[in-house]
Image: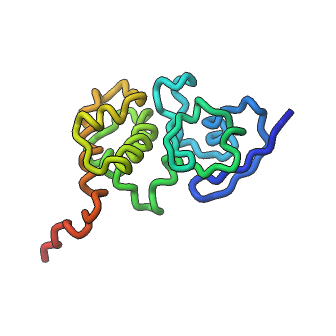
C-alpha cells in the first residue's frame, strides 16, 4: 500500500507516492533527484546522509519518507545561493576540508547546525559537534580548520569587521 508524501526541499515542493518503507535518503535522491545527500552505511553510523528537517539535523537513512510528510528539508544543494557557495561550502573548498568528498555534504550540514547553536566553537566543541559524522580520508584536521574559518565569516557582525578593499 503506497502513501502520498508531500515535502518542501530547498524551497521546492515535492509530492510523490512512496512505499511506506522508503527511507528519506532514497526519497531525496531518487524521487526528488537531489543526489548531494549521500548514502553511506544505512545504519546511521557515518552521517553522509545528514540533512536539515524542520531546522534540525537528521540522518536521513534513519527515518522513513512518510515520517517527513509536510516537513521543510534542506539538503547540501539548498545552502548555496545561485553560484555563490554558502560560507561553509566555501571554507571546505578553501581549507581543503575534503579529499574524496563523500562525507562532505553530511559534515557541512552538521557543521551548519553546530555554528547556528554556537557561532564561536572551540576546536574541541567542533570535534564533539561532528560526532556521528565519519571521514575516512582527512583525519579531520582540515575539516576543523574549515569550520573555524566559516565561523569567522558567519559570525554576527562579520561583514562589518571585513577589511576595506585596497585601491
Left or right placement of residue 69 versus residue 153 in this view: right
> Residue lying farthest front?
117
Find residue 23 and report its image quarter.
top right
Residue found 34% across the figure and 26% down from its top: 137
> Residue lying farthest right?
1
Residue 93 percent location from the top left of the image: 32, 47
Quadrant, the N terminus: top right
77 vs 43, nearest the viewer: 43
Q: Is residue 40 above or below residue 112?
A: above
> Residue lying farthest bottom?
167
Residue found 52% across the figure and 42% down from its top: 51
Quadrant, the C terminus: bottom left
Left or right placement of residue 163 versus residue 7 in this view: left
Residue 9 percent location from the top left of the image: 61, 52
52 vs 97, nearest the viewer: 52
Left or right placement of residue 132 versus residue 4 in this view: left
Q: How is the image coloured?
A: rainbow
Q: How many marks?
A: 0
Residue found 45% across the figure and 41% down from its top: 105
Amino acid at each position: 500500500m503506497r502513501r502520498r508524501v508531500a515535502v518542501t526541499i530547498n524551497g521546492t515542493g515535492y509530492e510523490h507516492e512512496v512505499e511506506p518503507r522508503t527511507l528519506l535518503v532514497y526519497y531525496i535522491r531518487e524521487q526528488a533527484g537531489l543526489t548531494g545527500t549521500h548514502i553511506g552505511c544505512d545504519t546511521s553510523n557515518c552521517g553522509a546522509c545528514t540533512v536539515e528537517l524542520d531546522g534540525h539535523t537528521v540522518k536521513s537513512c534513519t527515518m522513513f519518507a512518510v515520517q517527513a510528510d509536510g516537513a521543510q528539508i534542506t539538503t547540501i544543494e539548498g545552502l548555496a545561493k545561485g553560484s555563490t557557495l554558502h560560507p561553509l561550502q566555501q571554507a571546505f573548498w578553501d581549507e581543503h576540508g575534503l579529499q574524496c568528498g563523500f562525507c562532505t555534504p553530511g559534515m557541512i550540514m552538521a557543521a551548519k547546525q553546530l555554528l547556528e547553536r554556537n557561532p564561536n566553537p572551540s576546536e574541541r566543541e567542533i570535534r564533539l559537534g561532528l560526532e556521528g559524522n565519519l571521514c575516512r580520508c582527512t583525519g579531520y584536521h582540515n575539516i576543523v580548520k574549515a569550520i573555524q574559518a566559516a565561523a569567522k565569516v558567519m559570525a554576527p557582525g562579520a561583514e562589518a569587521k571585513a577589511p576595506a578593499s585596497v585601491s
